[in-house]
Structure formats: structure tokens, C-alpha cells
Image (cartoon, rainbow, N blue to C red):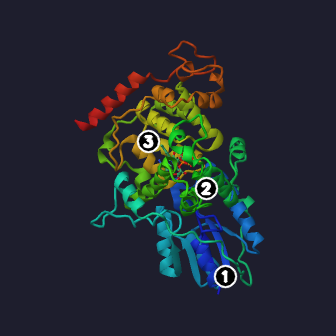
Amino acid sequence: KPQIVWLRRDLRMADQPALYAAAQAGPVIPVYVLDDDAAGSHAYGGASRWWMHHSLDSLSKSLGARHSRLILRCGDTVEELTKIVEETGAEVIHAIRHYEPWWRKAQGKLSDAFDLQLYDGNYLLPPGAVTTGSGTPYKIYTPFSKATLEQMPPRDVLPEPETLSHPDSWPKSDALDDWNLLPTRPDWSGGIDAFWQVGEAAAQDRLAEWEGDVAEYDDARNLPSQDGSSRLSPHLHFGEISPAQVWHALKGRRGKGWDVYGKELIWRDYAQNVICQFPAYPTQSYREDFEKLKWRDPKTDADAAADLKAWQKGKTGYPVVDAGMRQLWQTGWMHNRVRMIAASFLIKHLLIDWRHGEQWFWDTLVDADYAQNGTNWQWVAGTGVDSNMFVRIMAPLSQSEKFDAAGYISEYVPELAQLDAPYIHDPEEHGCLPDGYPAKIIGHREARERALDTYKAIKQ
Ligand code: FAD
């Protein structure tokens, strides 16, 4: 009897436990359901849709080369999968387990109605597997990371299924182009197109390149002007590659670079571990007193709305922040150090609720991830489960100098390209503000005082 493989953020053929198990059990029907309503505020944003289009296209071609097909359906996940079961007489639905609240709900309903077989596959260890001595989940990264390391390496990777037999007849499928996932008017995706290769083969190519560079990661990762990180994040998000594949490919590269890199992969597992405990984390400050903080609200305050727009467009007058926000818009990705600086600037310098930033990143990042985005925004804000504090305010100008962002700024802010360090970090202070580049929308000291005073008010 046919076996359905329900695909989500696991768009690969190798090390895909659900596909592997289905292929051993009978003819395989791979299905992807686009269900924006279920995800609500976290339906995929523009940059993710661009990626998804190309990733589905790539997987569909890989399946086609194996005489299989990718069936595309749009609508309510449970209804669509139910229809496919009825149309095909399928016996079992196989899927990799996912933890976004809307997918957990769908998994629950499907397992009530059908034989739903769920597999672990997108994390180093299954979320929930790492617990304290008393069996409770960790809230803080450092002990979580130590306990995870003790259980490494992750499970062995699986090969692609040897054969994929197909059903007697295929259920109907939408055409990918009809989903209109690519931007049309205006088409802002040119920079993204040039920056990325999408799909499982591209992810493996990127990993092979990265094997040669990971040794330098410890030193290079914090320097935005260097290409010092793996850029595997969108491939990992969409499951074009699994973290187990990455771990096993790199673990022979012993040394400081690899040690630090392995811990970054554990941050990814950690973020998921937080979401499993607090499913609404990307939409609610964990520390309740922050609900009382008098954020400047762009919905009711025109100045705050203008500031939010300046931040989104990379026109704050802080070169490193602007370079980051423009890199994000042009390429769908931003360097991690600059993500921290830009996020901190929105929350503390502009005093705008972190959730506005979370939503902008959600719409513009190709690696937008419910868990990683939400936990990182709350970490920067100091509103989350960990010990980072709101009163720790990053100074964007000294961060820019410390991490030598001059080359990065000239790449993404052409108005400043003719300036060298130190002028490029703060042209206004050095009296060399070029035409067309804005003065700072707020001074650093003034912003810092405003943030601290506003914070003090909720502590009284
Ligand atoms: P590398 O440095 O090569 O790291 C390897 C992998 O480890 C990454 O691909 C990623 O999967 C994981 N990783 C690295 N840093 C973190 C981290 N801080 N938290 C969780 N996982 C991490 N990452 C996302 O994948 N999606 C997001 O939506 C996202 N939103 C973020 C929002 C903010 C405000 C901040 C500060 C960080 C965010 N990050 C997010 C984390 C981090 O910036 C990216 O994972 C990283 O920049 C991706 O580039 P890379 O693949 O070259 O990373």
C-alpha cells in the first residue's frame, strides 16, 4: 500500500528518516502542503517564500530523476492529507517531527485519525532528550550545551533510499508556479538570487567548501568584513541538510574552530528546546514585567513609526546598523554579530518592542526560523529565559571599530565607500558626513539614558 511522506522543513533525499522508512515499506507519495492560515503571524515571509520556491523545485527535480513526484497541495494540512489518504488508499503517513505550534497541532490531529509515524531528524538530538539530573528541561544555554556535548556524536546519517517505487496512480498536484512564491511587482529578489544557490546539492557543496574554512571560524566569525561563517543557516532551516550530516562531515577537523562551530550548532538545538517549553516564546516576553515597559509604539506614535522605517531601510545614521539592514534586504541574510548590533539598536536605542524586529526579520531573512529568531530576539532584548539583561546596551559605534566592520560598511553603504577607518564608523562625529547619508536619528548617550530610565520605571 502507498506510503505518504509529509514534507515540511526537511526538503532532502539523504538522511531523511521519514523518506527512508517509507521507501522500505511500499510505494512512496511525497507531499508538501502550503498552509499559511495555520501558521498565522508566522506564515512564511517574503524571503522564505523565495527560498521555498527554489527548494521545492530542486527537490521535485531530484524526485523526478528517481521516477517519483512531489505532490503539492495548498490549504488546511489535515484536510489535504486526509483527501490524499482517501484518494490513494495510503496506509501510513511518515514525517519528520517538527515543533512549531501549528505543526504540533496538525501532528496531533493526524495521529488521532491515521497511522502517523514521526521520526527525529532535524536536530543533533531530539528536542526533549537533554534534561537535567532531575529530568526537567534546561532553560539556560551553557548547561544545555554541556549536557548535549556529552551525548555527541549525533545519530549516524542515513543514505538516500536505494529505490523509490511509485504508486499505481498519482494524486493530483498544484503547479509550483501557481503558488506565486516568488516576488512579482516589485521584484526585489535580484540580490538574493545572486547570493544563494538553493537545494540539497547546493547545501552539500557549501558544506564541502566550509570543511576547508571551519578551522578559522573561532577568529573569523565575529568579523563582518570577512566571509567567516558557514552560511548554512537557510539550508539547515529548510532541512536541505541535517545537522547530523554537518557534524559528521566536520568532526574530523579537530581544533578550536570546530569546537566553537559545534557549539553554534548546539545553539540551534537549544533554541528549539526553549520553544518546546514555551511555544509562544517568539510572540511574548518571557519576563512578564516587560509587558509594562513603555515601548515607543510605531502604531500610535509617528516618530516611532519613522524610526522603525529608518531602521528597516538602513537609514539610521549608524553605519554598521545600516550596513546590516541593507545586507538583510539585499541578500536575505545578515552577519550574526551585526544581527546582534542591529537588534539591540532597535530595542534599546529606538525603544521599540523587540517583536517589531522579530517580525521584520521573519519577513526578510531566508533563514527565518520560529525558534532561532524568537530566542535570539529575546536574548538581545534581555526579556527571555537566560541571564542577558536589558541594561546591557551595545554601543554600535565601538562595536563597529572593535570588529573591524569598515569593509562591510563600504560594501553595503555605498554613500560611505570613499571613507576609510576610523571615519567610516562614525562620519558625523568626524565631521565628514557625505551627501545623501543621514545624520544619526538619535545620539548614543541620549538613547542609552532614555532606555535605562524607561527600564527603571518598570522596576519601581
Ligand atoms: P554559523 O556561524 O556558520 O553557525 C552555524 C549554524 O549554527 C547556523 O547556521 C545556525 O543554524 C546555528 N547558529 C549559529 N548562531 C546561532 C544562534 N545565535 N542561535 C541559534 N542558532 C545559531 N538564525 C537562524 O538560523 N534563523 C533566524 O531566524 C535567526 N534569527 C536571529 C535573530 C537575531 C536578532 C540574532 C542576533 C540572531 C539570529 N539567528 C538566526 C542566529 C544567527 O545569527 C544565524 O544562525 C547565523 O548568522 C547564520 O549564519 P551561518 O549559517 O553562517 O552561521
Q: Is residue 97 left or right of residue 411?
A: left
Query: Disc 3 marks which residue?
Result: 354
First in sequence, mark 1 or 2: give its number: 1
For mark 2, give the secondary structure: helix
The residue drawn where x is 35% and y is 35% is: 392
Q: How far is mark 1 from mark 2, CA to CA?
A: 33 Å
Between circles 1 and 2, the one closer to the viewer is: 2
The image quarter in which residue 180 lies: bottom right
Query: Disc 1 marks which residue?
Result: 87
Three-letter code, disc 3? Trp
Residue placed furthest toward the bottom: 1
- Mark 1 closeness class: few <14, some 14–19, many ≥20 residues within 10 Å: few
For mark 3, give the secondary structure: helix
Q: Give the vertical position of 87 relative to 266 (above or below).
A: below
Q: Give the vertical position of 435 relative to 197 (above or below).
A: above
First in sequence, mark 2 or 3: give its number: 2
x then y, percent, for residue 206:
65, 52
Query: Disc 2 marks which residue?
Result: 235
Three-letter code, disc 1? Glu
In the picture, the disc for residue 437 is none
Q: Give the vertical position of 345 relative to 48 (above or below).
A: above
The residue drawn where x is 53% and y is 31% is: 321
Q: Name the foreground residue: 47 vs 431.
A: 431
Whether tag 2 and tag 3 are in contact, CB under 8 A, the answer is no
Q: How far is mark 3 from mark 1, CA to CA?
A: 46 Å
Asked whether mark 2 and ligand 1 are closer than 8 Å, the reply comes as: yes
x then y, percent, for residue 286:
34, 50
Between circles 3 and 1, the one closer to the viewer is: 3
Three-letter code, disc 2? His
